[in-house]
Amino acid sequence: MNNELSNTVAQQAPERMIGIDVSNETRASLTAVTAELSHPVFELSDVSVLYGDFRAVRGASMSIREHEITAFIGPSGCGKTTILRCLNRMNDFIETAKVEGTINYHGVNLYDPEVNSTEVRRRIGMVFQKPNPFPKSIYDNVAYGPRLMGIKNKAELDAVVEKSLRGSALWDEVKDRLKSSGLSLSGGQQQRLCIARAVAVEPDVILMDEPCSALDPIATARIEDLMKEIKSKYTIVIVTHNMQQAARVSDRTAFFTTEVGESDRRTGQLVEFNPTAKMFSNPDDERTEQYVTGRFG
Amino acid sequence: MNNELSNTVAQQAPERMIGIDVSNETRASLTAVTAELSHPVFELSDVSVLYGDFRAVRGASMSIREHEITAFIGPSGCGKTTILRCLNRMNDFIETAKVEGTINYHGVNLYDPEVNSTEVRRRIGMVFQKPNPFPKSIYDNVAYGPRLMGIKNKAELDAVVEKSLRGSALWDEVKDRLKSSGLSLSGGQQQRLCIARAVAVEPDVILMDEPCSALDPIATARIEDLMKEIKSKYTIVIVTHNMQQAARVSDRTAFFTTEVGESDRRTGQLVEFNPTAKMFSNPDDERTEQYVTGRFG
Amino acid sequence: MNELRSEFHHELDEVRNEIARLGASVVELIPRVTAILLDQDLEGAEYVLQADDEIDARAIDIEDRALTLLALQAPVARDLRQVAAALKLSPEIERSADLCGNICKAARRIYGHALDPKVRGIIQRMSDQAHKEYKEVVEAYLAVDPVRAAALPDMDEYLDDLHRQLIAQIFESHAAGTIDLQVAVQLALVARFYERLGDHAVNISQRVRYIASGWLPEHESAARFRARDDQANAHGELGKG
Amino acid sequence: MNELRSEFHHELDEVRNEIARLGASVVELIPRVTAILLDQDLEGAEYVLQADDEIDARAIDIEDRALTLLALQAPVARDLRQVAAALKLSPEIERSADLCGNICKAARRIYGHALDPKVRGIIQRMSDQAHKEYKEVVEAYLAVDPVRAAALPDMDEYLDDLHRQLIAQIFESHAAGTIDLQVAVQLALVARFYERLGDHAVNISQRVRYIASGWLPEHESAARFRARDDQANAHGELGKG
Amino acid sequence: MALVTPALGGKTATETVRASLTRRERDTAGFVMAGLLLFAMLLTLVILLTLLIQLFAEAGPYLADRKWSFITSSIGSDPDKIGVWPGLFGSAVIGIAVVVIAIPMGIAAAVYLEEYASTKNRWTQLILVNIRNLAGVPAVIFGVLGFIIFVTWLEPMSSGKTLIAAGLTMSVLVLPIVVITSMEAIRAVPQGLRDGGFGVGASRWEVTRDHVLPYAAPGILTGTMLSLARAFGEAAPLIIVGAVTGLLPETSLSGRFTAVPILIYSWSGKPQPPGSEHSFTEAAAAAGVVLLVLVLFFNSAAIVLRNRFERRRTGT
Amino acid sequence: MLTLTDLRGSSKQRNRERLMRLLFQAAAMVTVLISALIVFVLFRGAINFLRLIDWKAGILSDNGWLPRRERFDLRTIVWGSFMMGLVAMVVAVPLGLSVAVFLSEYASPRVRRVIKPVIEVLAGVPSVIVGYFVLRFVAPEIVTPAFNPTSQFNMLAAGLGIGILVIPIMASVSEDALASVPDSLREASYAIGARKINTVFRIVLPAAISGLVAAFIIAVSRAIGETMVATMAAGIDGSGPFDGYSPTSKGLSMTGAMTNAVGGTDQDVGGASFEVLYFVGALLFVITMLLNLVGNRIVNRIREQY
Amino acid sequence: GGDDSADTASADTASSESATAETAMSSEVSETAPTGELAAGSVFVSGSSTVEPISIRVGELAGELSGGDLAVTVEGPGTGDGFKLFCGGESDISDASRKIKDEEAALCTEAGVNFVELEVAIDGLSVLTNPANTAVECLDVPALYALMGPESEGFANWSDADALATEVGSASGPFPDVPLTVVGPGEESGTYDSFVEFAIAGLAEERVGEDSVFTRADYSSSANDNFIIEGIEGSDSSLGWVGYAYFKAEQDRLKAIAIDTGDGCVVPTDETIGDGSYGFSRSLYIYVNTDKAVENPAVASYVDLYLSEQGLASVGEAGYVDLPADRVAATQAAWAAAL
């Protein structure tokens, strides 16, 4: 055997040149089967969301697992964003909104009256559709959360800011202008700043509501890469109307759709929740198949 | 041979069951090679657009052909929208904008001082990023253009409206409520209404500036189907930041990118202009390859 | 609501039909080349060998179209399986047509040599069986009928049987001196060609099942290996569980 | 700026490496099975046939991964060609490994029969040539080197020559009575197996060229057909032009 | 701060999470702040309500006594007999002048600035700064301007201290307000509408006529109403221009004039004449009620219109 | 094939376009003309005034604003305007801002739907009515018992009146500024786990600062330019700050000085005591213009910063 | 209500009386303006704000009697302004709280405006204090100068003025040692001018100079008579002045100080003012453009009405003091002569 070839191939997996032992690792990376083994962060059972009398989403049950990226997809009005906003109680701000069923977060019912929604949001951060940096300096944007939590010490804040900006792959681009306004950044950078801001309070989960819909493909790719990078530290749930995005980044995908419910209004429902590879190659439900292939009945 | 099989297959192409004569037709549909033969609607040669001192796009040359869908893709700020807006002189409204080079429309220089931009826009319609129906009835939205052109006769207008709405695949959905506001439609329907409105003045060309960026995947697919349907009548130029969309709908694709020009500002330039199938399977330029595959140098 | 992405789906159907047509060509070729072989029809052989070129071209065309669909339409789920199957099937069918061509070539090589009637009988039966299988699988493909497709491996067992019979018969005939070595070797190859045609039909049937259900045709050997491997790794898995 | 979609591109590289590894397995298998054949090493044959199962499993795995990439990452341009090539190459290599397995099976079938030294010599040379081709093409694949890949068809002509030589030698040996019909047929098949190995190497080389440049391997026959066809349609084309 | 990641799951982790999620800190500052803000708002409402109550309380008995005669009577020396008629007439004419002069001109200027003028142009910048500044110029200065221009310089046309002069003065006063509110309304017209118009080959004027102005109409109308309210309520410039507070039996365009706010001003300082049952201050309060009704009507109309407009824009 | 003439359009249309543009432009120019006239009239009068007065007597520094005695101590009326404005802002800024913050951040949509229009309607209450209110209620019922001023009508009472007049304006403009802060910023803050008070004070108010400054400037400008309340309730006394500079003393604002100048006397008109109208007008114009310009500058700078 | 002026309530009797009065006065007048037949038309009266209330009342009367045909517009920008308009030919009649000045008359002549001066009423000025202030009952002119003249600026106590009072020859002192709060009309008012003329001008011209004929600047001024009255009421030792009419309306709340203009202390009453014994009184006039009166019968009608008994009743209603009969006759005669 020629040296060149054996070097190249053998270096990467010397024991496997002909060996019997194809490790599971290779196959595992294919479909993220290990996911089955990871810990559930959220457990939704039979969750419905009502706005006044109107049932926006009905009876969704699923398990969102640690250190995974879970994507919610579906047509407009299917309730994917509604469910996302239940996960850190952002829908508290809509007065008429009411959540039925239970949403457990690490085993604790998020809608328990004892639970403090502010605390919930410290643990479960959120990134929004439109990049929304505060009209403050880059530094102050990131330091906002830590300061709220009582960190006053300059050195400590500096450290948190640097860590968070590094964590969101923004440090190199902004380290020389931390004092300039967050709004002076490009759209994609702004969104990464928002991620840095969310990350700065060391949350457990980051919810993302169509974080790339306002961005161009390059900025989108950058955010997607970032998500994959940070998922080892955080559990990520992303709502996207871009199926390809869900396919590219997520480990599991939940497909929601609408059905005409009582009084002619459309109620969202969870159709299928499966590993992403399965959703896009061989979904269980015919409606999922029709949606992902672009046939819509 | 079994009857069932021969029926199914043979009906579709009886002469080809085994025959030697595979017609060219099949292959032609693959790469739209016939396009080479069609008439050029726009001929851009060495077109640069300047905003004040700043050169937004430099030296773009291309030929946009009749009854084709031509897509412009590229990262933010690459000048694709700028060039599009030159094609019907919509950039006249940006005061500092200046166009260098020549843009010929059916052989007439669009930027000839004699040319009336309003007249140009009657021939070269435009559909915008956000669906922008007039806050009028569906009927009046479509009838607006024809009325401007002096059509007063009710029967004639009715005919134009119906034809345009049929042409934009909206007639069946709205025929019973032509008097209701255009704003009462869903986002996707609004965008089709805008297409109907553009079509009503019987333009030659329809320019579309990211017409689906505000729509969900279902509405997007509907518009894309519509574009393919109407391209037999109109020449369509579409700007999209969604590469997949360009791949799906267009016959030819122009890829623009930015380069850092004088004084550190990014100038757009046309990198490659080729049949879409080629652009996405085997582009000529390495930068195109990097862009479409998501590697960005 | 109407179906969306209709042009794409139409093109997908077109590709499918073209594959079916190509398959139908093979279905037609099989009895034809058998007749050429048995009737020593040199003209027919020439014609078929030229037709083979056309089938190659059409197969390439299908592959081209499938790749273009992949590049432009980013198909997923069943659509993707269709396209992936097209990529797999077009060489499969093209290879089948090649096999038919090979049979013609063999016919030319043994031109002038008389064939043992027993051998002729088995060849005819192999041809009929291969033809039957191929027709069945092309129909199953067109109908995306995994149930019919699932029958193919078992059907093919009969062809394998015939193959063994033919080989045995060839040895017997050779031993009996009714055919010489050249002819014997060519006939052995021909036997293999028919058998391969059946294999291709089986492969196609697996693709049909794949299109319908996403079931990926895991060769029995691969499955065997997996089984062994999983056993070996059982302890490790438990540790993780 | 860093490369984007790095995970995807990393997985693409992984698939490529895995294909190269699989190819390397075949590269290693070829001399090994020749030795088994010539040395009548039954143990070795058994081992290789089991290893073949593994290769089948790995090939399936590669196909699976390629399909997943297609479903999830919507690759285009070179990436798409990589994935499409992976879909094509994994069965190509798997078939090559099968051929190696077939050689082992042939070795078992002719177990106990002595082989003519001349036949042995040609088989060894065929093996060496097939090994050379396969190694060359796997290296070309790993390096995405269309220039090296372009040499394969010509290299394969030598293998075809050897194939003809071997067939001739087999007839000769059979005529000389040094090998009986069974062995002769098996050896003829073995000869074909080596030749097919070379064909697979050529196919792989074409895929390498395809990955590098998008050049789709049009079989000569297809090209021939096109040429004829275009001529026939020349008048029509001119009419349109 | 950092959540103890419950790597192994189970009860302990759940309890840790529960403990941290149910932590209750007293949000005293927030509570106090909310209370303070509520108090401030209630105080404001109380003040403003007191104003209204005070006014109505003083005017009530008087108006009950006078009934419609207070509207139809002229001004004079006896609080028992006087009325706001000349004031209403004057205010109405001023209102008409505003509608006829200031509003078309203001809208036209706004259209020019928003639709035609180049923002980069120095002239445009000057006009913009100038208008913003004019809107902040005290009303009394417009009185001076009106006095000089319309009363003195243009005497042949206005016949001096007449309603014509007053109407022109008030038109000039509200012009910047009309321009600014109209500009805001026009600016709120989505660019998409213009693009849509241009896209089908409409000219600038056609787009303005067919889309911009109709869409901005409610907003412009709001501005119009507000400026009318302002014109009705403003007294200072009329004092300078020379409103009559004595006797005004005749109301005509070219004669002397008065206006409701002037009457309030004048009456609120007059002593009760001997022999009159009511005082001038009561009459002033009653005139205040009349003015308030007038102004608040236009103001409310403006606000109702704007709210409806906003609701339409955000989509119901 | 298309020719140039096809794209030339009709001349009728071109002429109509040109005419409309001209009309609109003329209207815009009128506003400039108005400003020019204001400047011309005021400054011509002011120069006249300065020519009429006796410089040697040093009258501008004399104690008190008594035009008939040719005593034109600017300090008196500037102080009067300043003091009334100050009192007004002391009342209006906290109250107006609080109302705005409450409505925009704390009130439920239902409360906001009711209160906001009420506040806006009240922003239109004519100043003469507020003047009347001060005359009849604030001065006698509030200021006199609470501060025991030397005069029932004084700068404090007038200032309070102006404050009342300005509260709804302050509240309304500030509320607009707060409402224009995108909800996305609030959401972002809450999503980090911030409380309402943090969100309001660290995010919303800073983000709205330019609008708030604008509101403040508008309010100050309005307070200084306010005429009727100052005329009716401040006591119109330019005899100088003899009570010290106490807000509880009577006073005279610049606007009051102007209405005084035109309020007839039985003496001769004309002369400095009338021309002073222009002088004070010019002064007032300059002051409010500076306020407006500074305000715009601040607003622009803050806007650029963010 | 006023004690001896006709009540508005008895308008009917008043009008019948006026008819007899007018025939008695002048036959010519009765010819031009027959009773109850006032000429229709418009009259514009401008001028003194002091005279304005009388003109308004007469105007109202004219409107009533003519059923609205005789429309009289009255404004009161001030005597000076009034003369400007009058001599500019803009007003038909000018109210005046003083006689026309020579330069004003010259203006009229220049403009070709012929006019007649008609005295219509007497205005008294009351110097007031709080009823609680018993220490002061009567003040002479030097005392007023000492307390309120330009030299008194800064005097916060009555007794501060003692020295100055003595210096200028007052016999009213010494003053009590109580705080001195001076309240009065603003400088823009006619009443202010009158007060200065009566109490300050002589000594001020003599002692300070012609340019300083003013009261002290540091007094509490108001344009609103109600507030002056309240101001005087508000301090136990206040000192102020208002028109006699206002005092008359509020005499329960205030105390008038007797004034000594050389003939002993005189308290202001209708009688003392009417007969001239109260020093602080002045005549009020109207000036009529005679050409307009001829051209426009409405003007003549209005003046006729003004000078009729019914018209002159307004003087009392407005709070001024009626002219003695002889001066009424003189005025009527002047009017008759002017036509």
Image (cartoon, coloured by chain):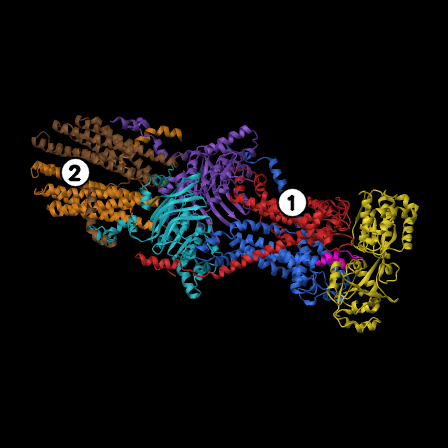
Chain colours: A cyan, B purple, C brown, D orange, E red, F blue, G yellow
Could you classify mark 2 by the number of other residues whose Cα lies within 10 Å: few (under 14), some (14-19), or many (20 or more)? some
Disc 1 is attached to a residue of which chain?
A: E
Is there one chain holding both mark 2 and mark 1? Answer: no
Start-end of magenta stretch: F255-277
Q: Is residue B188 left or right of residue E207?
A: left
Decide which of B13, F94 is in the foreground and name it.
Answer: F94
Q: Which residue is mark 1?
A: E103
Q: Is residue B33 visible?
A: yes
Amino acid type shown at disc 1: Ile
Asked whether residue G82 is drawn in magenta, I would say no
Relative image position of residue E295 (x, y in whole percent): 65, 48
Mark 2 and mark 1: Cα distance apart in space: 102 Å
Asked if the residues shown at circle 2 and circle 1 are in contact, with their CB atoms under 8 angstroms apart, the answer is: no
Instruction: Identify the secondary structure beneath mark 1.
Output: helix
User: What is the quadrant of residue A167 in the picture?
Assistant: bottom left
- Mainly helix, strand or loop, the magenta region? helix
Amino acid type shown at disc 2: Arg
Decide which of A46, A227 is in the foreground and name it.
Answer: A46
Up-down relation of residue E203 to residue A144 (above or below): above
Up-down relation of residue A129 to residue C163 (above or below): below
Q: Which residue is mark 2?
A: D164
Could you classify mark 1 by the number of other residues whose Cα lies within 10 Å: few (under 14), some (14-19), or many (20 or more)? many
Q: Is residue E130 left or right of residue D200?
A: right
